[in-house]
Image (spheres, rainbow, N blue to C red):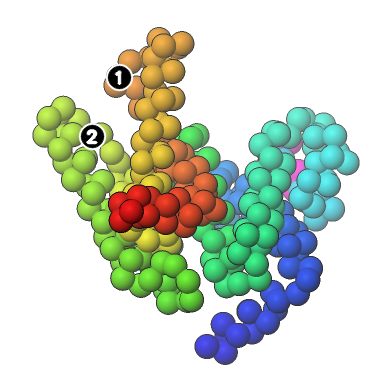
Amino acid sequence: MLGSFSIQEAIETPLWPVAALALGLIVGSFANVCIHRLPLGQSVVTPRSRCPHCRAAISARDNVPLLSYALLLGRCRYCRAPISLRYPLVEAANGLLYLGLALQFGSTLRAVVLMAFTTALLVLSLIDLDYQLLPDVITLPAIPVGLTASLLPGPPTPLNAALGAAGGYLTFGLVAWAYHRTRGGEGLGRGDWKMTAMIGAFLGWDQMLLVVFIASLTGTVVGLALIAFRGGNGKSRLPLGTFLGLAGIAVSFVGEPVTAWYRGLLHG
């Protein structure tokens, strides 16, 4: 409890949105490291970041979020090789997410929890887009973290979070089993099950269903577009984790009013 109060006191400041933006940019820089190294099985702590072309170590002055990229004109200081635009975009996206959460939820522990959650979703989305991989090192520890966070004031309740985690895992497991029985192949990787359980732990049962609905709908639209314009087929694999992650980020902002509106329709 003392830890909770100290964190709460630290974020109760008029400058909280500005601090959240700055924190988001810094964490976004670390997110880039995770996106690059985790699929390769490398440590995200050591060694320090290096240019992928000349292997020169990146100094602290060249690692300031957004600013360093702009000052270097998007190129390595030493070999002048271009730096991927994704790096500043991830930093900017994470910073704006933190700013949005700070403005919407105020200086609350719920905002801090959702910041960590959305960063994890951003990292998972991009890793799955590149490798069709959802690392257990993110999804598995995040499930108990989400369940513990449900003890804080506000949604979801501990019961709702537990139902969301269990329901998300079992529902996707059932879909994968049915697909295997009817089509004879693997329809959903276990990483998708674990990621959905993670989303359920943080957002609860009802919002987890909303995430799955949005992700499935978006994935279907994108799949049909690929078939129509790129000559794909119904067996083409799509990174479901990417759609789950983006939907989870959106629902973090709008999930409560949307699910409240839906419940109102059912009971109206």
Question: Which residue in the protein does label 1 denote?
Answer: 234
Closest to the camera, between mark 1 and mark 2, is 1
Q: Residue at x 47, y 44 (%)?
A: 247
Residue sticking out furthest to the bottom: 2
Range shown magenta: 53-57
Q: Residue at x 68, y 82 (%)?
A: 9
Q: Residue at x 15, y 38 (%)?
A: 178
Sort mark 2 into few (<14), some (14-19) or many (20+) by Cα contacts within 10 Å.
Answer: few
Q: Identify which residue, 23 or 108, lies in the foreground.
A: 108
Question: Which residue in the protein does label 2 denote?
Answer: 186
Sort mark 1 into few (<14), some (14-19) or many (20+) by Cα contacts within 10 Å.
Answer: few
Left or right: 130 with respect to 24? left
- Residue 92 seen anywhere in this rendered image of the structure: yes
Left or right: 56 with respect to 188? right
Q: Identify which residue, 43 or 145, lies in the foreground.
A: 145
Note whether 228 is above or below 93 in the view shown: above
What x and y, as percent, mark residue 243?
A: 44, 38
What x and y, as percent, mark residue 205?
A: 33, 58
Which of the marked residues, 1 or 2, is nearer the chain's N terminus?
2
Mark 1 vs mark 2, CA separation in Å = 14 Å
Left or right: 94 with respect to 228? right
Q: Residue at x 46, y 11 (%)?
A: 229
* Residue type at tag 1: Gly
Which mark identifies residue 137? none
Note whether 181 is above or below 17 in the view shown: above
Element carrying mark 2: loop
Element carrying mark 1: loop
Q: Main secondary structure of the magenta part?
A: loop
What x and y, as percent, mark residue 140?
A: 38, 60
